């Protein structure tokens, strides 16, 4: 699994231009969301957490699809499956790499959000944990579905179609927790939303790992 | 893998007939015999179709989940055909459920849609299963299609309780579920009769749809490699 993770990270490092492009895409979507609300500073600040997560979600469909793009060239995935290793190791390697990339992307989008929506917060540690947990919720089922959709014709349409309804609870909890971190949390609810996110992550990291072997087997 | 058997027989048509009889009886009593509800008035009568639809939509999805699990362990295409049938009927029922809910919500709550846990969960479920149907359309290899849709069904079904509880924390307005034990005895018969009516209809539809899916699977799995003249020439 470590070898699989190393391979993924190396691939991502070699294609850092791709990461930059996705970041610009995410930042551009954050900019566009503010046009949906209009130049109303208070409303923008209220909805900033939602915009951040929608931006991250839209960007994630790009990175997730890209993570299997290399495997499909020259049928590299089949070669990997022939190795005497568990397909689960391949899955977790790829999922962890995707998770790291999404987390990084989330961190990179925060300053954009702060500048555009005036949504600053001093609870940076908490925000970092929320982004890491939320990105984990996106990447576990996202990696599994990307493995399926990368092999079919309408991949650009199918991945969001399958992924978006599924991650509703993770999105809800991330938005709520982030918005509590930005707007203040007088009732101390943020902990229970983070617990929900952690539970979602736990369920899907184990379930998707179990099922991945069935998805890629011939 | 062996070919799934194609069943014939009139059982599904009897199911449909029975379902229609139950629905007519239940709806007649519900619309003309049972008294109007004290607070909601005539609007409440939609409960006689809404609640049975809700139960059966969930039942169809649960059956789809069971088919997916069985297929994962037994790899028998019979279960793939049933999965396809159950998901399609389940999606139809979930869609009807959302429409009926909106019709009921407008005069009662004053809005077509509300972010209530059950409503939202139904909508999420509807989109999740529509996604699986779309996935099935784009995968040509039957073995892959069966395996992937089983995996996707299990993942989507596992999401239902999480969506439900997360939305419930988020916001709530929907009234408590209605069941024969929570409603007055005068509402009891039409609710029961319609529940069985929709159940029989659903079973009949799933059986017929599974037969169609089986027939298609048989042609897909049995097809010998047909070469056109020019291809055969190239290979030779």
Image (spheres, coloured by chain):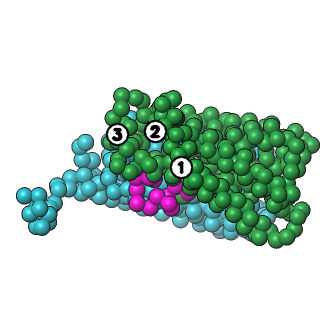
Disc marking residue B23: none
Q: Are marks 1 and 2 on the same chain?
A: yes
Residue drawn where x is 29% and y is 54% of the image: B217
Q: Is residue B107 above or below residue A162?
A: below
- The residue wearing badge 2 is A212
Q: Is residue A206 above or below residue B142?
A: above
Instruction: Decide which of tag 1 and tag 2 comes sooner along the chain.
Output: 1
In the image, residue B187 lies at what x, y percent?
68, 56
For marks 1 and 2, give the one nearer the viewer: 1
Check the residue under mark 2 and report the chain it is in.
A
Instruction: Decide which of tag 1 and tag 3 comes sooner along the chain.
Output: 1
Q: Which residues are magenta?
A: A148-160
| Rendered colour, chain A | green
- SS at mark 1? loop
- The residue wearing badge 1 is A15
> What is the magenta segment's predominant secondary structure?
helix
Q: Nearer the viewer, residue B183 or B163?
A: B163
Query: Which chain is rendered cyan in the image?
Result: B
């Amino acid at each position: 699994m470590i070898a699989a993770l190393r391979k993924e990270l190396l691939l991502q490092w070699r294609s850092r231009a791709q990461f930059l492009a996705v970041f610009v895409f995410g930042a551009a979507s954050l900019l566009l969301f503010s046009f949906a609300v209009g130049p109303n500073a208070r409303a923008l600040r209220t909805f900033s957490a939602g915009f951040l997560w929608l931006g991250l979600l839209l960007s994630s469909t790009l990175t997730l699809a890209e993570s299997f793009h290399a495997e499909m060239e020259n049928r590299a995935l089949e070669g990997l499956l022939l190795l005497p290793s568990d397909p689960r190791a391949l899955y977790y390697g790829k999922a962890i790499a995707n998770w790291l990339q999404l987390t990084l992307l989330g961190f990179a989008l925060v300053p954009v959000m702060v500048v555009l929506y005036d949504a600053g917060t001093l609870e940076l540690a908490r925000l970092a944990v929320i982004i890491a947990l939320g990105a984990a919720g996106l990447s576990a089922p996202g990696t599994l579905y990307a493995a399926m959709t990368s092999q079919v014709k309408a991949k650009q349409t199918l991945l969001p179609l399958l992924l978006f309804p599924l991650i509703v609870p993770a999105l809800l909890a991330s938005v709520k927790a982030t918005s509590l971190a930005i707007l203040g949390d007088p009732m101390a609810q943020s902990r229970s939303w983070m617990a929900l996110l952690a539970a979602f992550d736990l369920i899907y990291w184990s379930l998707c790992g179990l099922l991945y072997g069935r998805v890629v087997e011939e | 893998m062996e070919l799934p058997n194609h069943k014939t027989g009139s059982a599904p048509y009897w199911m449909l007939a029975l379902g229609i009889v139950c629905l007519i009886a239940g709806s007649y009593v519900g619309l003309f015999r049972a008294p109007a509800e004290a607070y909601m008035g005539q609007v409440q009568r939609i409960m006689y179709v809404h609640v049975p639809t809700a139960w059966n939509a969930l039942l169809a999805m649960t059956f789809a989940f069971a088919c997916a699990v069985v297929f994962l362990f037994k790899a028998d295409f019979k279960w793939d055909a049933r999965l396809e049938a159950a998901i399609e009927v389940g999606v139809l029922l979930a869609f009807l459920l959302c429409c009926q809910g909106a019709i009921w919500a407008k005069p009662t709550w004053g809005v077509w849609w509300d972010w209530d846990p059950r409503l939202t969960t139904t909508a999420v479920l509807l989109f999740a299963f529509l996604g699986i149907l779309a996935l099935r359309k784009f995968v040509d290899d039957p073995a892959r299609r069966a395996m992937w849709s089983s995996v996707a069904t299990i993942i989507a079904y596992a999401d239902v309780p999480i969506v439900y509880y997360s939305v419930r924390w988020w916001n709530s307005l929907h009234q408590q579920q209605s069941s024969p034990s929570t409603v007055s005895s005068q509402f009891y018969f039409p609710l029961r009769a319609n529940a069985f009516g929709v159940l029989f209809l659903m079973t009949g539809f799933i059986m017929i749809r599974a037969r169609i899916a089986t027939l298609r699977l048989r042609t897909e799995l049995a097809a010998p490699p047909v070469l056109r003249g020019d291809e055969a020439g190239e290979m030779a």
